[in-house]
């Protein structure tokens, strides 16, 4: 599945994700700046914060309870479109997903 990350400076990074990998892992693998993923996907750092396009929320789903709690501590204030990208598992259904990287991680 194709995924596009938009960096805080507006740069677009269109990548081919491996199905089954998380969005965070995909960004780190390709060296996309702005996604840190400090905890390696363990849902304990909130340094992989992204904003999902409102029209894509149906496909990704919203943050679950614990993820939402983690987002409350994110450096960039979370919105209802916020997700921790280590919790977005790439599948063919998510092809074309666009994620905007939170400016502060
Ligand atoms: Fe740490 Fe996502 S990588 S919460």
Image: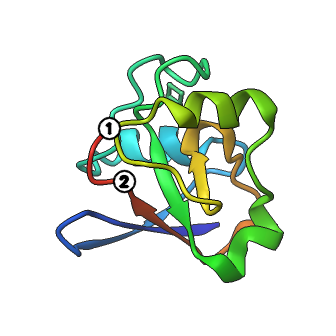
Circles 2 and 1: CB atoms closer than 8 Å: yes
For residue 89, side relative to residue 96 (left or right): right
Q: Quadrant for the N terminus, please.
A: bottom right
Q: Where is residue 34 in the image (x, y as percent from the top left)?
A: 27, 47
Mark-to-mark CA distance, 2 and 1: 7 Å
Classify 87 as above or below 96: above
Mark 1: which secondary structure? loop
Residue 102 — which label? 2
Mark 2: which secondary structure? loop
Q: Quadrant for the C terminus, please.
A: top left
Classify 85 as above or below 82: above
Residue 105 — which label? 1
In which quadrant of the rendered view does residue 91 lie? bottom right
Q: Which of 40 and 103 is in front in this view?
A: 103
For residue 81, side relative to residue 99 (left or right): right
Residue at 47 percent across and 21 percent down: it is 45
């Amino acid at each position: 599945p194709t995924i596009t990350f938009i960096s805080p400076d507006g740069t677009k990074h269109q990548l081919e994700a491996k199905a089954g990998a998380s969005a965070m892992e995909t960004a780190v693998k390709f060296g996309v700046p702005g996604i840190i993923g400090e905890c390696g996907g363990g849902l304990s750092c909130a340094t992989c914060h992204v904003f999902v396009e409102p029209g894509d929320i149906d496909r990704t789903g919203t943050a679950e309870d614990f993820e939402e709690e983690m987002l409350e501590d994110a450096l960039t204030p979370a919105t209802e479109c916020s997700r921790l990208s280590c919790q977005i598992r790439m599948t063919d259904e998510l092809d074309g997903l666009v994620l905007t990287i939170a400016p502060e991680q």
